[in-house]
Image: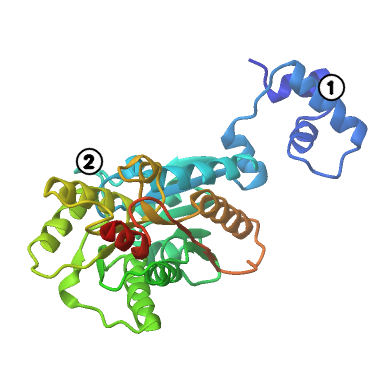
């Protein structure tokens, strides 16, 4: 395997000149740079990351840590799509992604922050709040968070417009003729869950409807949580004619239970979700939902973090990505239902 000394010998220049040519310094002639880079390619030379770090003071590595309330990890379709877009965007700039696990052997006393320092990553992408977040922010390592707010000179955050998304869904359903609104919320220690619940109340206030507390149940963002929420609704004597779920997975779980108990969707009860994961399209009936732009969330997070790592002041420390209402077969205008009943 070729070394930097081999490159220097063949090019007839010093080792430091080779290093400066590889790392893009401007104090060598363009002719020398092209000559060195041609020989680097011919001899298939790849500088070690540790050596490049010494020269550039960058590892070209971004750390990833995520805390999911349900331990779904990469298996959750939302996480998977956001991370795919994020990794593609940082890859264009020559960065790799290093995942920090939460599992530690009993004799390991290093926490997440110690491992971040040891790995010397150039920045950190957070999905969820690690327990030692304050200690991480104190290091001034550039950090971008997804779905929660961060403030500070070396931090930024990005999330969907959760509140407006649910508020617009309420308004849309009202225009379709729905009047009895239920809601299944997620874990309220998570910022998106709280915003979606607030959006539900704001939407009802906007259309002049008072919420029924019996129709507001816990759905936990999960498939099983949605099934449990549906069982709670089924115990009621008076039920909503539409129920909004804080995630697609919980909505799909609920639809299964409703159908097992002989309820027709949307004839007996309308159901909506939030996310627009692929399963929303394939569900039966297909799921009306609030679409998050997961690709844009990932790209925006990457751009925010790359900007912070470059030392530039961010144009905005927090970005809110718009959502979109997607109407499918799990809801239907009430006038169509009423016409069908009359017929």
Residue 172 in the image, given as x and y percentages of width and height: 43, 68
How crowded is the residue under tag 2: few (<14 C-alpha within 10 Å), some, or many (20+)? few
Residue at the spot of label 2: 105
Viewer-side residue, 67 vs 160: 160
How crowded is the residue under tag 1: few (<14 C-alpha within 10 Å), some, or many (20+)? some
Name the quadrant of the N terminus. Answer: top right
Residue at 40 percent across and 82 percent down: it is 206
Residue 324 in the image, given as x and y percentages of width and height: 49, 60
Camera-nearest label, 1 or 2? 2
Residue at the spot of label 1: 11
- In the rendered image, the vertical position of residue 309 relative to residue 75, given as above or below: below
Secondary structure, mark 1, is helix
Residue at 60 percent across and 39 percent down: it is 91
- In the rendered image, the vertical position of residue 8 relative to residue 303, given as above or below: above
Asked if labels 2 and 1 touch by Cβ distance under 8 angstroms, the answer is no
Name the quadrant of the C terminus. Answer: bottom left
Viewer-side residue, 77 vs 323: 323
Q: State which quadrant residue 26 falls in.
A: top right
Between the residue at mark 1 and the residue at mark 2, the CA separation in whole angstroms equals 49 Å
Residue at 79 percent across and 35 percent down: it is 21
Residue 113 in sight here? no
């Amino acid at each position: 395997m070729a070394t930097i000394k081999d490159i220097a010998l063949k090019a007839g220049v010093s080792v430091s000149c080779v290093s400066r040519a590889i790392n893009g310094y401007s104090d060598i002639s363009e002719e020398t740079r092209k000559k060195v880079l041609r020989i680097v390619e011919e001899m298939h030379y790849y500088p070690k990351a540790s050596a490049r770090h010494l020269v550039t003071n960058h590892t070209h590595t971004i750390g990833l840590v995520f805390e999911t309330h349900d331990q779904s990890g990469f298996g959750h379709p939302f996480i998977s799509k956001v991370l795919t877009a994020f990794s593609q965007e940082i890859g264009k700039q020559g960065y790799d992604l290093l995942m920090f696990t939460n599992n530690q052997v009993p004799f390991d006393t290093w926490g997440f922050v110690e491992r971040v320092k040891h790995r010397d990553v150039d920045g950190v992408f957070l999905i969820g709040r690690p327990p030692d977040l304050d200690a991480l922010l104190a290091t001034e390592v550039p950090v971008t968070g997804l779905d929660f707010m961060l403030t500070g000179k070396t931090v930024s955050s990005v999330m969907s417009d959760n509140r407006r998304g649910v508020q617009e869904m309420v308004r849309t359903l009202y225009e379709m003729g729905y009047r009895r609104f239920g809601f299944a919320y997620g874990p309220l220690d998570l910022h998106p869950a709280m915003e979606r619940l607030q959006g539900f109340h704001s939407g009802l206030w906007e259309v002049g409807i008072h919420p029924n507390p019996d129709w507001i149940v816990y759905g936990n963002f999960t498939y099983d949580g949605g099934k449990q929420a549906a069982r709670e609704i089924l115990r009621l004597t008076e039920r909503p004619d539409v129920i909004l779920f804080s995630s697609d997975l919980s909505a799909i779980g609920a639809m299964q239970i409703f159908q097992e108990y002989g309820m027709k969707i949307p004839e007996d009860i309308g159901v909506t979700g939030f996310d627009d994961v692929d399963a929303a399209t394939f569900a039966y009936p297909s799921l009306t939902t609030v679409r998050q732009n997961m690709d844009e969330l990932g790209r925006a997070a990457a751009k925010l973090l790359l900007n912070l790592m470059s030392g530039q002041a961010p144009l905005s420390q927090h970005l809110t990505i718009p959502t979109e209402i997607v109407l499918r077969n799990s809801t239907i205008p009430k006038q169509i239902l009423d016409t069908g009943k009359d017929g």
